Amino acid sequence: MKLIIAIVQDKDSQSLLNGLVKANIRATKLASTGGFLKEGNTTFLIGVEEEQVEHALTCIKENCQTREQPTNQAPVLGEIGRFPVSVTVGGATVFVLDVDRFDHF
Ligand code: 2BA
């Protein structure tokens, strides 16, 4: 079994959840906060059998898009102070982990 951890933008979370449910893939949705932008994002925990991993990743790719987001977290420019620039966020940051043991009581 594998555990997929997917960090996505809040704007994509509902369509991803719908896509996963439609694909009969179980998931848990957690509220999270990005360390850089310090803004809300959504983390999905998705437990799947190995043969479902690619299907789940396709579902994530299809439902999550990249967006430009303004930030004032850029490096300080001398005396001018922080300068608002934009960063490209997402579609999704994904980790696929081996699961040693899975119990469902
Ligand atoms: P944030 O940490 O809020 O980062 C938002 C976006 O800011 C990132 O998008 C990236 O474009 C930019 N960014 C992040 N750190 C940066 C830095 N040190 N310098 C310049 N730009 C930086 P994504 O890469 O798509 O990441 C989206 C969210 O995924 C992140 O939100 C964070 O919550 C999570 N994430 C990304 N990489 C991660 C990792 N290696 N471990 C854990 N979480 C990660």
Image: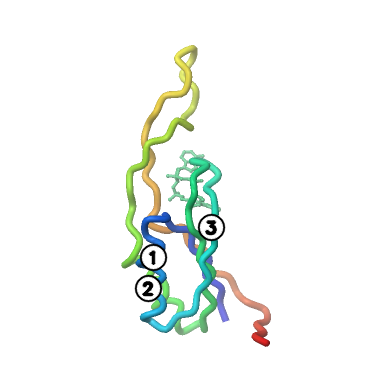
The residue drawn where x is 45% and y is 14% is 80
Tell me which numbered mark, 1 or 3, is placed earlier along the sequence: 1
Vertically, is 32 above or below 3?
above
The residue drawn where x is 32% and y is 57% is 65
Marks 3/2: CA–CA distance: 17 Å
The image quadrant where one finds the C terminus is: bottom right
The residue drawn where x is 38% and y is 81% is 23
- Residue closer to the observer: 67 or 105: 105
Q: Position of residue 28 (x, y in %)?
A: 53, 71
Identify residue type, mark 3: Ala
Please report contact status of discs 3 and 2: CB closer than 8 Å, yes or no: no
Please report contact status of discs 2 and 1: CB closer than 8 Å, yes or no: yes
Q: Which residue is mark 2?
A: 18
SS class, disc 3: strand
Identify residue type, mark 1: Gln
Q: Which residue is mark 1?
A: 14
Specify few, some or many for label 1: CA neighbours under 10 Å numbering under 14, 14-19, or 20 or more: some
Identify residue type, mark 2: Asn
Q: Position of residue 92 (x, y in %)?
A: 42, 58
Q: Which residue is mark 3?
A: 31
Vertically, is 95 above or below 66?
below
SS class, disc 1: helix
The disc placed on residue 37 is none
SS class, disc 2: helix
Vertically, is 102 above or below 65?
below
Marks 1/3: CA–CA distance: 12 Å
